[in-house]
Amino acid sequence: MKPTDPDAFAGLVKQEPEPASKMMRGAPVVECAQCHGFGKWISTPNAFGPGKHSTMHCMNCNGWGYVSAKQGDHIHEWSRGETIANCLTRYTCAGCGEKWDVDSSD
C-alpha cells in the first residue's frame, strides 16, 4: 500500500503538532503532504493477523506528521547521504536543498 491508497490511514491516529513544533524550534508547522499528519501509513494490511498491520514510517516528516510551514506541500526527495563524521550522515533534498543530519551513534 502507498500513502495515496484510500485505506492507507484506516484506524491510525493523527499526531499532535506539538512535538514537531518543538523539533522545529517553535517555527510554524503544517501537516505533512505525504502522511497527512499521521507520521506513518499502513503498508501491508493484516500482516500480523486480523487488524494487525505493518506500517511504513514517513521519511518526509521523520514520523512527526508535520513539517515546517516554509516547506508547505513539498515532499522531500532525500539524497543517498554524505558522511560528515564517523556516525553523522547528511541528506539533502533534491527539490529544495534542505539538509537533514542523522547521528547514528546510539
Image (spheres, helix red, strand yellow):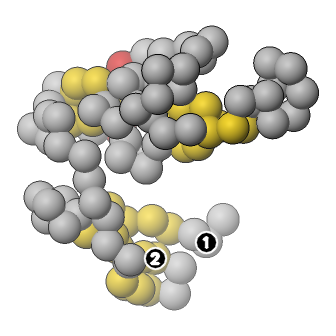
Q: Is residue 15 above or below residue 54?
A: above
x and y percentages locating residue 32 in the rendered image: 31, 31
Q: Residue at x 22, y 26 (%)?
A: 29
Alpha-carbon distance for marks 2 and 1? Answer: 8 Å
Q: Quadrant of residue 83?
A: bottom left
| Amino acid at circle 1 | Ser
The disc label shown at residue 6, or none: none
Q: Quadrant of residue 43?
A: top right
Q: Residue at x 58, y 15 (%)?
A: 10
x and y percentages locating residue 82 in the rendered image: 36, 83
Query: In the rendered structure, are the residues bearing label 2 and label 1 in contact, judged by CB atoms less than 8 Å apart?
Result: yes
Q: Residue at x 11, y 58 (%)?
A: 96
How packed mark 1 is, by other alpha carbons closer than 10 Å (few <14, some 14-19, many 20 or more), is: few
Quadrant where the C terminus is found in the figure: bottom right
x and y percentages locating residue 54 in the rendered image: 72, 37
Residue found at the far right of this picture = 49
In the displayed structure, does residue 8 sit left or right of residue 32?
right
The residue carrying mark 1 is: 105
Indicate the secondary structure of the residue bearing disc 1: loop
The residue carrying mark 2 is: 88
Indicate the secondary structure of the residue bearing disc 2: strand
